[in-house]
Amino acid sequence: MRDQWFKLRRCGPAALAVLACLLVASTWHVFGNVWDEPEHIAAGLSLIDQGDYRYDNQHPPLARLAAALGPQLAGARLPANASTSGEQAGRDILYHSGASYDTLLTLARAGMLPFLLLLVIAQWYWVRESFGAAVAWWATLFLGSTPAILGHAGVVALDVPVTALCVLSFWLLQRWIIAPTLKRSIAMGVVVGLAVSTKISAIPFLALGGIAMLAVQLLLDRGNASGAAPERRLPASLLRYIGGALLATVLVTVICIGAYGPYLVHMPGIAMRVPLGVQEFMLNIRGVEFHNAHGHPSYLLGETDLMGWWYFYLVALAVKTTIPMLLLGVPGLAWLTLRGWRARQLGQMVPGLLFATLLIFCCLYSHINIGVRHVLVLYPLLAIGAGAAALALWQQLAAPLARAVAVVLVLWQFSTLVTAYPDYLAWFNAFAGAHPERILVDSDLDWGQDLRRLSQELARRQITDVYIAYRGSADLTREHLPSYKPLWPHQQVTGWIALDMLSLKESNHGYDWLQRYQPLQRIGKSIDLYYLPPP
């Protein structure tokens, strides 16, 4: 019996990760491609096929290569005369390759599953080391039942990959700060390099998180200096930190450049050819900075704006997070941070410290307010707080009422796996009410994912003509739609009308005239179907 329990403890995290992947994979057939998927696939194939990284160079290639590998093995290729538009090139690959659209999209999405596996397993081992196995189990279960995580793991996007690698990096950063050995410096540099090679947002997340952890550790060291061993005194610690940081920085740079492969290019002002990664990594950073400085069209609470709102992510987290995780996670993180400070233990303070640091940074800095996915890295931290709080309610507050509250909240959390299925991407909690489109839209509710459901519903109703207002990256001419016409803003028509939420909310009131009528049906979570009889 003891041997079986030991095997369960060893295999349990991997089993949870596999179950999460199976749950995500079961949703693939429901949804067509979301907005960013064609371009991510095209960018990855351009690097694999032609040694050129030509599409949307704000993003490094690691996750895109993972998405493109399956389609490439199935015979998909980037045409030699491919479009200069990444969206169009991706559409051409999906719709005009030897393998079918469904096959290629499935293979591309399968490339995201290793990152979900990594996220769940890294979370478990990190939490187990800092808080014990019991908290690790609960934190991992809370994470694996978070709709935002499952929804974004089910599409080709960079947010779950960078979250997974950031979580692993946080753990290794924590270990390195507590004891900056050579081995830990190397491990930290390798994993941080992989994280930055996935998405540029990993740079501020990991840099700010690492600085915050190091500052707190130095405070703890200084407070304990009189009783500490000589090797833990402040000057010696600083020297080891500086040396380890320099080594890790070299490794990060090598990995970020190497992620683009062995290809060489000419750069202006440099006589010799240099690795493609030297050129592209600098373009990644400049591209993100330019995008953020110039903003992005955003929608929040009935308003549109180019530069966003400082409170965007606070609202997004409030309506896109399960209520049990909010009720348990935030106070749980505060409690762990206070307990860690009193015990002079950095490991217990790290989740709350990181959560506050990264949330404040995103609120104050980001002008690209297009979804909770940009702060997806906060969910593993919230899950740690929720897991610790749920366990504390059960173990430390043994009163029947406290235990009943814990049971209700945990069951409520896990029930979301059923009630939200398969729409984890577009799921909102009860705070959003019946019309979440009044709060958030882009990638939180409508990312173009419900076009397949629309075609199925039109076929079921035997509709032969329809007006469609759709903002997504699918090729409508290649979808299984009846005869259709685009519905332009301010164009008032009669007959069958399909209107997606992005068009409704981000078209400068161009479809407000339709709000006088009641839709017959909400297709999926993001498309309203109307019938307006002729006069």
Image (cartoon, grey):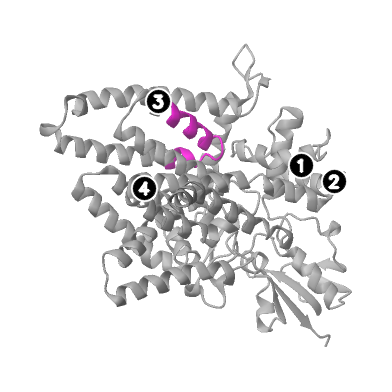
User: Which sits in the foreground, 27 or 469?
Assistant: 27
Give the residue number, with chain letter if any, for mark 3. 183
Comparing marks 1 and 3, which lies closer to the viewer? 3
The secondary element bearing badge 4 is classed as helix
Residue 131: where, in percent of width, then height?
33, 50
The first of marks 1 and 2 along the sequence is: 1
Comparing marks 3 and 4, which lies closer to the viewer? 3
> Is residue 299 shown above or below 13?
below
Q: How far apart are marks 3 and 4 (CA)?
A: 24 Å
Q: How far apart are marks 1 and 3 (CA)?
A: 37 Å
Q: Is residue 257 something one can see in this rendering?
A: yes
Give the residue number, with chain letter if any, for mark 2. 99
The secondary element bearing badge 2 is classed as loop
Using residue 463 as the reference point, say whether residue 305 is left or right of it. left
Q: How far apart are marks 2 and 4 (CA)?
A: 44 Å
Q: Do the residues labelled 1 and 2 touch (CB within 8 Å)?
A: yes
Q: Is residue 302 something one can see in this rendering?
A: no
Give the residue number, with chain letter if any, for mark 4. 354
Q: Residue 71 carries which label?
A: 1
